[in-house]
Structures are given as structure tokens and as C-alpha cells.
Image (tube, grey):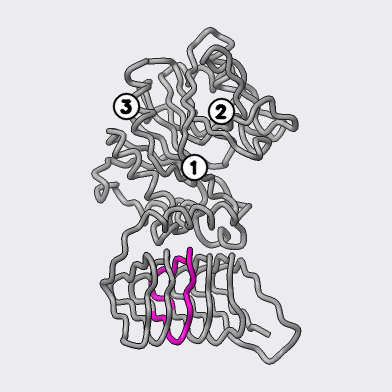
């Protein structure tokens, strides 16, 4: 069995962050989202991985390389335009070579992994098996209808969903999916939808089995979902300290202080993680906060947020929360008024706080 990880797309829902970085590389609990997927695929017993890349290919290739850190054999497949998930399958035809494969969306995070799904597919040998979860807003996803334990209908982002079972973004296929992807036409939004391809399998008498997960999953394409995923992953950590915490500082609850990090005259209340080479000085870091490497926080309060590498937050008079701050950002004080704080800042930004 092979794996196909999709890392194309423009990441429009996370702009301006994704103007300058791939959405799959935004860190959750100080680990890029994509890396969780690579770990899940390895755990499922799959070694050969094709990664479909688009305009952010250089970043993805630099981050993942040949896959050897995970014990994987990685090959890159270029998709000129993000024309749908089924289109990504078509451009991967040579790589897949008719073999069974798992298709995994690179910005998805599934806490319990996909080993159970892969094992079930190997045992039952349907033509396709799709991962489903019950969601509050099914109109945002592909939605499945079940009868007698089988999938009978799929609709992509329906206005009036027939169920609350959403496609999670992990799919198992045998070689028949290639014929399905070739047979379908572009949808109203101009894309070749994988839901239409799976519906083609159903309509042509092929077996599509559901696998409904009990645990949580997140499509991290929106800020609120990314912060929620960060919260959940921080709760799974064990406390650790490889950096320096001075005698005037306190760490409370589950706090990870990575190599070379310094906490000086500050309080860090977990769950939280402080990245390599980061300095926290005379500040408060609240629960559910991930601060990546090379960051400096001085005289400020941050809670329920993600701060990316090499950024500076200095002398902020109010608390920053529910925020995603990009790479190389500077957030500092300004004498102007009125006051307001809520940030989603792109890389290399400079913001004066008033």
C-alpha cells in the first residue's frame, strides 16, 4: 500500500499567514501539521509516500526532504493548479501504478491516527473506505449518507446536509478510483471532486465502506480550528524542561521548555510549550499557548495563541489571546490611541500597539 498526501491549494482561509508559508507547515504544539500526518502514515504501516505539491512546493520539500526522519520513502508530484482532490489523484497516476493507497489531506489532524482505518481496509478489502466524523457544520464538508452500513450517497458542501457525517479527509482506495476520476466532470466550482469520484464507484456497483471515528479530528484550514487543535495537542504533552527557568519564574501545570529557551522573571501556566532559543522575560504565558523557536516575549501577556519563529512581542499593556502571529513579526507599543488587540499577522509584519 502507498500513501498520497495532498499539500497543494492556496490556504486562502489562513491568509495573510499563507501568503508566505504553506498552511501544512504551520506548527501545532510546535510541530508542523504535516508532520503529524507523516507520523500517522508510518504508524499505519505505509512506507512509500507521494506528496502532491503546488505553489508552496519548495517549502514542503525543504521541510520533509526524502522522508528519512520518519522512515519513509517520499516522492514529490507537482500539480500545476489545485483543480480538486480527484485531479490530484489523476496527476499521481504514474506514481500510484494501480496499487491500493491511502489519501491524506496534509492540513488535517487526527489525534488517534489512521492505523485502525488502514487495518480495516486491508482486512475487508472494499474498493474504497472513507473516514467519517459527526460535525456541527456539515455544510462545510463533503457529507455522507449511509444505508445498512454502506455509503449510498456523497454530496460536496451541501446547502441542506442530509446527515451530520462529514468526510474527514482520509480515504482508502484500490485501483478503481482512477477510472472514477477519469469519468467525472468538473463541479460547479470548476474542480474534480473526490466525492463525485466516490459516488461514481457507488453508482457502478463497487463497495464503499464507512469508518466513523469516535475521537476528534481537525481540518486546520481556519484560525479557530488551528487554535483548537493546538489546545488539544498541548493537553497530550508531558512536562519537560531542557532550557533555563530562573528562580524568580514559575511554571504551573504541563509546561515544555525546549533546548536553549529561557524563562526570566515570568510565569508560564500550562499546558504550554516554549520553543528552542526563545526568551520569555517579565511576562505571563497563559494556557494553550505555543511559542515556536527564536521568539522573544518581554513585558507582555499571551494566552491561547500560536507565535511563530523569530518574532518579538514587547511591552504590550493588554493581554494577547486567540491569536496566530507569523514569522519574523514585531509587536510593540505605540503612543497612539484608541486601544484594541486581536491579531492574525502575516510574516515580516511590524505592528505598533496603541
* Quarter of the figure with the C terminus: bottom right
Q: Earlier in the sequence, mark 2 or mark 3?
A: 3
The reply to whether the magenta stretch includes residue 287 is yes
Relative image position of residue 148 (x, y in whole percent):
54, 12
The reply to whether the magenta stretch includes residue 330 is no
The boundaries of the magenta stretch are 279-295
Q: Which residue is mark 3?
A: 1
Circle 1 Cα neighbour tier, 10 Å, few/some/many (<14 / 14–19 / ≥20): many
Q: CA distance from mark 1 to mark 2?
A: 19 Å
Residue with the most extreme front position: 253
Identify the residue at image location x=45%, y=87%.
282
Relative image position of residue 281 (x, y in whole percent):
43, 85
Q: CA distance from mark 3 to mark 1?
A: 23 Å
Q: Is residue 174 above or below residue 90?
A: above
Identify the residue at image location x=42%, y=49%.
34
Q: How many marks?
A: 3
Query: Is residue 53 at least partly visible in the picture?
Result: no
Residue 146 placement: quadrant: top right
Circle 3 Cα neighbour tier, 10 Å, few/some/many (<14 / 14–19 / ≥20): some
Q: Which residue is mark 2?
A: 194
Amino acid at each position: 500500500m502507498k500513501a498520497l498526501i495532498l499539500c497543494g491549494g492556496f490556504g486562502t482561509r489562513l491568509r495573510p499567514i499563507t501568503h508566505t508559508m504553506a498552511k501544512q507547515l504551520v506548527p501545532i504544539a510546535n510541530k508542523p501539521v504535516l508532520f503529524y500526518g507523516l507520523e500517522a502514515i508510518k504508524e499505519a504501516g505505509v512506507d512509500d509516500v507521494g506528496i502532491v505539491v503546488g505553489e508552496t512546493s519548495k517549502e514542503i520539500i525543504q521541510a520533509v526532504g526524502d522522508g528519512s526522519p520518519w522512515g519513509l520513502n517520499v516522492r514529490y508530484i507537482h500539480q500545476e493548479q489545485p483543480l480538486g482532490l480527484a485531479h490530484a489523484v489523476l496527476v499521481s497516476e504514474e506514481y500510484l501504478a494501480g496499487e491500493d493507497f491511502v489519501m491524506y489531506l496534509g492540513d488535517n489532524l487526527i489525534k488517534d491516527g489512521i492505523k485502525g482505518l488502514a487495518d480495516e481496509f486491508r482486512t475487508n478489502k472494499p474498493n474504497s473506505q472513507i473516514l467519517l466524523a459527526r460535525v456541527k457544520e456539515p455544510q462545510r464538508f463533503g457529507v455522507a449518507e449511509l444505508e445498512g452500513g454502506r455509503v449510498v450517497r456523497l454530496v460536496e458542501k451541501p446547502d441542506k446536509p442530509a446527515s451530520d457525517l462529514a468526510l474527514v479527509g482520509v480515504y482508502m482506495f484500490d485501483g478503481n478510483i482512477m477510472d472514477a476520476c477519469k469519468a467525472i466532470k468538473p463541479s460547479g466550482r470548476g474542480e474534480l471532486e473526490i466525492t463525485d469520484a466516490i459516488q461514481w464507484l457507488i453508482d457502478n456497483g463497487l463497495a464503499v465502506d464507512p469508518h466513523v471515528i469516535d475521537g476528534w479530528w481537525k481540518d486546520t484550514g481556519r484560525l479557530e480550528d488551528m487554535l483548537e487543535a493546538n489546545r488539544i495537542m498541548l493537553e497530550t504533552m508531558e512536562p519537560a524542561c531542557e532550557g533555563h527557568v530562573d528562580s524568580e519564574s514559575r511554571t504551573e501545570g504541563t509546561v515544555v521548555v525546549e533546548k536553549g529557551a529561557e524563562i526570566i522573571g515570568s510565569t508560564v501556566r500550562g499546558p504550554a510549550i516554549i520553543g528552542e532559543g526563545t526568551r520569555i522575560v517579565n511576562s505571563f504565558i497563559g494556557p494553550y499557548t505555543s511559542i515556536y523557536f527564536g521568539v522573544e516575549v518581554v513585558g507582555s501577556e499571551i494566552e491561547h495563541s500560536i507565535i511563530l519563529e523569530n518574532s518579538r512581542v514587547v511591552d504590550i499593556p493588554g493581554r494577547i489571546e486567540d491569536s496566530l502571529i507569523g514569522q519574523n513579526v514585531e509587536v510593540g507599543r505605540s503612543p497612539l490611541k484608541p486601544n484594541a488587540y486581536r491579531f492574525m499577522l502575516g510574516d515580516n509584519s511590524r505592528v505598533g500597539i496603541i
